[in-house]
Image (cartoon, helix red, strand yellow):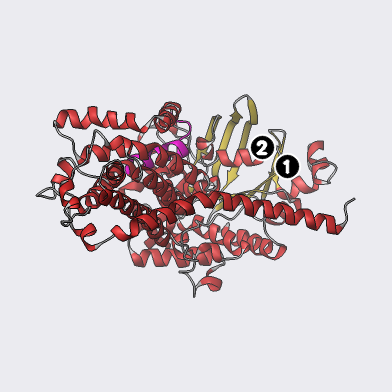
Amino acid sequence: MLQKISSGISEMSYFNSASAGESTGLKNKIPSDPLLRMETRDLTVKYGSVTGVKNITLPVYSNKVLALIGPSGCGKTTYLRALNRMHDLTRGAVVSGEVWLDGHNIYHSDMNPVIVRRRIGMVFQKPTPFPTMSIYDNVVAGLKLVGIRNKKLLNDVCERALRQAALFEEVKDRLKDPGASLSGGQQQRLSIARALAVDPEVLLMDEPTSSLDPQSTNRIEELIHTLKKQVTIVIVTHNMQQAARISDHTAFFYMGDLVETGPTQSIFTKPKESRTEEYITGRFG
Amino acid sequence: MKTLLQRNIRDRFMEGLLVFSTIIVLLPLLIIMIHVIIHGIHALTWDFFTQELGSPSRAVQGRPTGLIHTILGTIVVDTLALAIAMPIGIGAGIMLSEFPDHKLNPTLRIMNDTLNGMPAILKGLMAFVLIVKPMGTFSGLAGGVALAFVMLPIIARSTESALMSIPWSIREAGLAIGLPRWRVVLSTVMPAAKFGLVTGILIAFARAAGEAAPLLFTSFGNNYLPNHWSGLILGPVDTLPQRLYSLAISPYSHWHSMGWAAAIVLFALIILTFVAARFLTRKKI
């Protein structure tokens, strides 16, 4: 079914510019490591004179979950938002350095941010269903609003995305109800389904469970576990138990610096840096 | 420490104060309405809605006379104004709210505020120079342009604030599923702001529909119905606010009561517009 969907999507010239980077030769291309989905090199984000994160070099491995942890204001969300060019809209934000996605620098002038965001989806802290749309329209918004009208395709995508987000069984009889009529936890899964509907390669999640109750949190954590078979996930979390439970790799940020990164197990059991150990044992932050 | 009784009395007192202020606000409107209806109701005859005004002798000699040409003229001029001001005003409002970093934005904001503060008679003069002079005749079109200048800054400002009231997160959610920016505004932000948008347009419409000054040397006024409907656009036409004034200063008592009746019709027109729009934008949930 996935094949059918991607063939439907590639019919549109709209998506063809995704390969724009390829035609420009080597300057925008590096030999890509199949295990590596994304990589940032010397990534720095400044808001005016304030530095959000500085010189972050960090690999993001394919079909793994990378957790970004650290105390409030450490730059983890700033870093995450740089990964799909969300800072383009932030007044005064300046991003320097490189962000590579499958061998393309997404900040290269040939890259269209709209295409980048289609390949790198995002789920936010608070659920954000489009207020005037039904559950169905919310899920397929990313397809319908760029002109895909094929009912069959949209129906298939809607069901697939809702199943991926573990929401289908709960809403299948009321797809025409407003998205805002769902509970908070369901709305967040709706947001996830909406992000998955456009078939992204990477899913960025900015504290997706911080506004949810423990039961809904559980469901989303389970979801992340199954989703990583299909997409690469980068998740910001305040909750260290959550990072330990769901992630394969962990990166610890502190005051705009990347202090330490590595497999989650070693970060949590034998951190190399004293600041990491102090943070994960709860001595500060 | 005050006793519960004292606090209750205080609470009731403050509440009373609020009710009192509300009545003060509503009273002038009520007085005007009652006064206008008492004086004008008897002039609202069949002839009033089916005959043109003609010369004063018709009224003096008791021949049929009415304001059909004025009512039609008002509808044409106001609709023209709305058709011109709505797309431009909404466009400017979108610019102000959604592209705050654009280099044209500060200029647009200043110009819009200046236009809003500009005396209405000068807007009539603008339309006179732009339309009446080149066309060589007073016209409904010129009146429509003059009233469009009245509506434009109000629509731009109200559109801006209606759009700003929609949380920024909705826009980011739209961008995150790979929608272009204009599509996010059009399909997610504007539907969510629908109620505010329509209310703003109505306020602008009501405000412009009551203006007489900009119409004096643009649509000019007319005692007769044109032979052909195009005369309502291309020739001098009558409008309610302006006719109301000329009827009121005339020396004929029958014309005086027709003036009051014109005021009732103007009132009804504005109230009807409000009711219609409320009905169209009523919340579905």
Query: Residue A176 lies in what quarter of the image?
Result: bottom left
Where, by quadrant of the figure, is residue B132 drawn?
top left
**Residue A177 horizontal/vertical position (percent):** 49, 68
Residue in the picture at 17% in, 40% down: B236
SS at circle 2: loop
Give the quadrant of the N terminus of chain A.
Answer: bottom left
Task: Locate residue A127, reporting x and y percent.
Answer: 58, 56
The amino acid type, in three-letter code, at marker 2 is: Gly
Residue at 62% across / 62% down in the picture? A184
Give the residue type at disc 1: Gly
Q: Position of residue A15 (x, y in %)?
A: 36, 47
Residue B100 in the magenta stretch? The answer is yes
In the image, B136 versus A36, the foreground residue is B136
User: Could you say which is closer to the camera, residue B251 or residue B29?
Assistant: B251
> In which quadrant is the C terminus of chain A drawn?
top right
**Can you identify the residue that label 2 sits on?**
A75
